[in-house]
Image: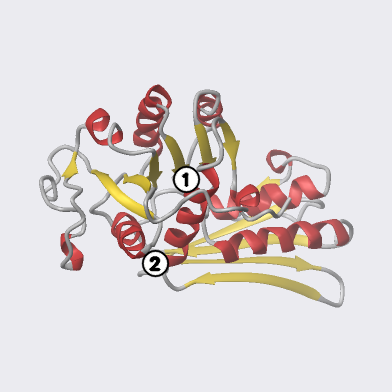
Amino acid sequence: MTSTSSPTTPLRVAVAGASGRMGRMLVEAIQNSGDCVLTAALDLPGSPALGMDAAAFLGQTSGAVIESDLKSALSKADFLIDFTRPQGTLAHLAVCAQLGVKAVIGTTGFSEEEKAQIAAFAQQTAIMLAPNMSVGVNVTLKLLEMAAKALDTDYDIEIIEAHHKHKVDAPSGTALKMGEVIAQAQGTQLQDRAVYERFGHTGERKENTIGFATVRGGDIVGDHTVLFAGTGERIEITHKSSSRSTYAQGSLRAVRFLASQNTGQFDMFDVLNLR
């Protein structure tokens, strides 16, 4: 991909949830980038961070003051990066569509109806939606696609994920994406194969199912393992995150990708040319 930016035309980026863990990681990544500039920062009404410079925690000045006025903030930016909650993200996207602001969405936990709303917004502006922005995770998804095609019979599939104790949705969006990629590679739909709960006398494992196991505890950033269990052997494909910085760097790659798009919905496979 050819870069669309230069030192004299920085990409103007707004960050939602700017005072949160992921928001601060995004602010730091933007501050350290050579082609992006933080022009707006959003947080909820009542946040103690309102009125502060978004980069104050770094001992720096970005010029972007954290605010809660959505239209005011987005009018100063060409791109929004959002890792918040579904309801908030949808409200943000409605204004992005209205103003023509392009959006990089890392929020997870959307319902099918909410995903349809995002697709509708993508007819008005460019949206990159992915449950995980990590370059490594998306390469892992490609590996899973390859493995699923080769191991389409006689292998039981289990997806095990672990995250910090504050995560509110389960299984993780990344785990669900892994299941979707595997199911699609085998010509099926995840909704027809997923098993999310096991308790009590479950009986033997049903053939052709994809099982999920969830761990929540401590400060685990994100661990995902997909197990292909056959007779006499098993294959495990694992990705472990030790820092949210990988998500921030992937988000900036998505911003650069969207710079050359006008409308449409994309994912990290598009950004990384993994189709």
Give the foreground label among 2 and 1. Answer: 1
Q: Earlier in the sequence, mark 2 or mark 1?
A: 1
Amino acid carrying label 1: it is Thr
Give the camera-side residue of 29 and 162. 29
Mark 2 to mark 1: distance in Å?
Answer: 19 Å
Neighbor class of circle 1 (other Cα within 10 Å; few <14, some 14-19, many 20+) is: many
Please say if the residues under marks 2 and 1 sit with CB atoms less than 8 Å apart: no
Q: Position of residue 252 (x, y in %)?
A: 45, 55
- The quadrant holding residue 68 is top left
Residue 138 horizontal side relative to residue 155, left or right: left
* Left or right: residue 197 compared with residue 33: right
Q: Position of residue 120 (x, y in %)?
A: 54, 23
Q: Nearer the viewer, residue 3 or 92?
A: 3
Local SS, label 2: loop
Q: What residue is shown at x 15% (from left), y 45% (from top)?
A: 47
Q: Is residue 247 visible?
A: yes
Residue 99 left/right relative to 50: right
Q: Residue at x 59, y 69 (%)?
A: 239
Question: Up-down: is 69 above or below 181?
Answer: above
Residue marked by disc 1:
108
Q: Nearer the viewer, residue 104 or 47?
A: 104
Q: Residue at x 28, y 59 (%)?
A: 24
Question: Given the image, on which type of amino acid does mark 2 rest?
Answer: Gly
Q: Where in the figure is residue 192, as x and y percent of width and height?
A: 73, 39
- Disc 2 target residue: 217
Q: Secondary structure at mark 1?
A: loop
Vertical order, 236 against 262 (above or below): below
Give 205 or 7, whichever is nearer the viewer.
7
Q: Position of residue 113 (x, y in %)?
A: 53, 26
For this view, does 215 lie left or right of residue 80? right
Q: Which mark is residue 268?
A: none
Is residue 202 visible in the rendered image? The answer is no
